[in-house]
Amino acid sequence: MKVNVEIDCTPEEARRFFGLPDLGPVHEAYVARMTRFAEDGMTSADVEKAMQGWMGSVGGLADMQRAMFSALTNGFTGTAEPKD
């Protein structure tokens, strides 16, 4: 037996039905902030803060590079420990 149910509702009605929060104000605040960045331009402090968030500290980036190199090397040699 096959049963098809078709529901005709707006996204707002579906959100309320499932009890999901209204993120409209958060979205508006985010868009306003991105608009300010686009209009005013990003300062060097903004760029530095973004890069720090994406990459962490320089040591963190170096650690990530070592881990990736180790994973590649171990994959080719078949060993569990990196070769020194």
Image: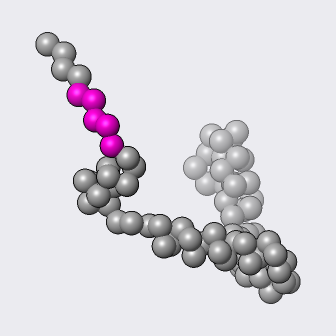
Instruction: Locate residue 17 relative to residue 21 in the image: left or right.
Output: left
Secondary structure mainly formed by the magenta segment:
loop
6 drawn magenta: yes
* Residue 22 drawn at (x, y percent): 39, 66
Instruction: Locate residue 17 relative to residue 66 in the image: left or right.
Output: left
Q: Is residue 60 visible?
A: no
- In the depicted view, which residue is nearer to us: 60 or 44? 44
Q: Please determine whether, in this image, residue 6 is positioned above or below residue 26.
A: above
Which part of the image, by quadrant, shows the C terminus? bottom right
- In the depicted view, which residue is nearer to us: 41 or 11? 11
- Residue at 47% across, 67% down: 24
* Residue 14 drawn at (x, y percent): 32, 50
**Residues rendered magenta in the picture:** 5-9
Residue at the extreme top: 1
Protein image colouring: one colour
* Residue 38 drawn at (x, y percent): 79, 72
Q: Please determine whether, in this image, residue 16 is positioned above or below residue 22.
A: above
Residue at the extreme left: 1
Which part of the image, by quadrant, shows the N terminus? top left
Instruction: Locate residue 42 relative to residue 67 in the image: left or right.
Output: right
- In the depicted view, which residue is nearer to us: 7 or 54? 7
Q: Quadrant of residue 43?
A: bottom right
Residue at the extreme bottom: 45
Q: Quadrant of residue 52?
A: bottom right
- Residue at 25% across, 53% down: 17
- In the depicted view, which residue is nearer to us: 39 or 82? 39
- Residue at 69% across, 64% down: 64
Q: Is residue 25 visible?
A: yes
27 drawn magenta: no
* Residue 32 drawn at (x, y percent): 65, 75
